[in-house]
Image (cartoon, rainbow, N blue to C red):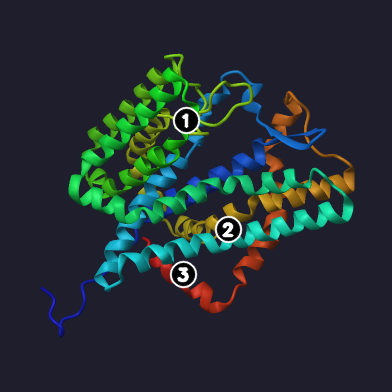
Amino acid sequence: MTTPESPAPPAAPRDKYVDFLRALSLIVVVLWHWAFTILQWEPGGPEPTSPLGFTSGLWILTWLLQVLPLFFYIGGHVHLLSWNRARQRGVGIGAFVWRRIRALAVPALVLSGVWAVAGAVVTWAFGVDWMWRVVLLVLSPLWFLGVYLVLIALLPVALWLHRRYDVLALIWLGGAALIVDVVRFRYGVEWAGWLNMIVVWGLAHQAGFFYDRIVILPRRYDVGVLWTGLFALFGLVYSGIYPGSMVGVPGDKWSNMAPPTFVIVALLIFQIGLVEVLRPSMERVLERPGWRHVNATINRFALPLFLFHTTGMAIALGVSWWLFGTLGAKVPPDLKWWLERPIAILGPLVCTLPVLLLYNRRPRAEQSHDKSSTRRHS
């Protein structure tokens, strides 16, 4: 027991693997949007599509590259860890939740407001009727932040379920997600599927509360979790009920993401097992000085990069249209398009960097608050 005269116990070392997974999940989403968004020009304005609809078998890659389940899982762990530390400092749950909501909501609202004003000005000044489509496309990736904010607001309920019912909370959420799918697919109640926006992502977030228990499991259990998720994915996809892709594909009757289906629960189990199997190797890599620096830099810019990556992409497309008169891509994508994918990210990256620098030049007090929040979250 610590007395007033005795020094406080040392803080637990920062989990570099958590930092890496959290940043990686956002970076993968950004790179996917930059490299694999095909923009077509329709009478009503720009319309996005995906190479998944034109390339047979490519959907299997989404089992690794659809990393939002992993992001919500890591987010649950971070929130539990942050709350435990905040509670020790005497912070109430209301203040804690509000601080977290404000930290995420303010930048997203400012970005949305700027684009809404820009869209209104361009539409009014130049009579560009399709400008609203541009604004919608730029802001559409923020949908998951909206869900994330709802889960933060529901954190008191999630914490109570965890304390009171432990693993039963996960089982009930998984069962609820499955029941929603039955009502949706068996009885044709399509609107019921949107309940899974909270149920499925809430399950992934709640699973993060068990992160520390999962980490200490013997390696054979990690392998078992991986294979359980993988077999569940194969069984659900090849049942003929669910599509194989973990992202929306043009032409598919249903999507596993909009709204999420029970398949995402299987994907979560598979990804948890995968990251735990890879943990020993990755922890050794992340201890190297060069990788520590890369990990810290990526974590510093991962969230603002996600927030502004579609803004940079829109700027890059606008510059391309202005300089070369080109906008959009050939459908279906040909060999040249595939060979250009490694360099397709350069334009959006170059156009996003100035926005990141402006974001980083916010008032010092605000940046200090963000940094202290980051330290508390890990």
Identify residue for label 1. 63
Along the line of sight, which residue is nearer the eye, 378 or 174? 174
Q: Earlier in the sequence, mark 2 or mark 3?
A: 2
Mark 1 or 2: the one toward you: 2
* Quarter of image, res 363: bottom right
Residue drawn at (31%, 64%) of the image: 93
Residue drawn at (51%, 51%) of the image: 145
Q: Residues within 10 Å of mark 2 (few under 14, many from 20)?
A: some
Q: Is residue 302 above or below residue 278?
A: below
Seen as rendered, the residue at the extreme left is 1
* Quarter of image, res 114: bottom right
Q: Earlier in the sequence, mark 1 or mark 3?
A: 1
Q: Residues within 10 Å of mark 3 (few under 14, many from 20)?
A: few
User: Which disc is residue 371 wearing?
Assistant: 3
Mark 2 or 3: the one toward you: 2
| Residue 185 screen position, x and y as percent | 45, 20
| Residue 365 screen position, x and y as percent | 52, 78
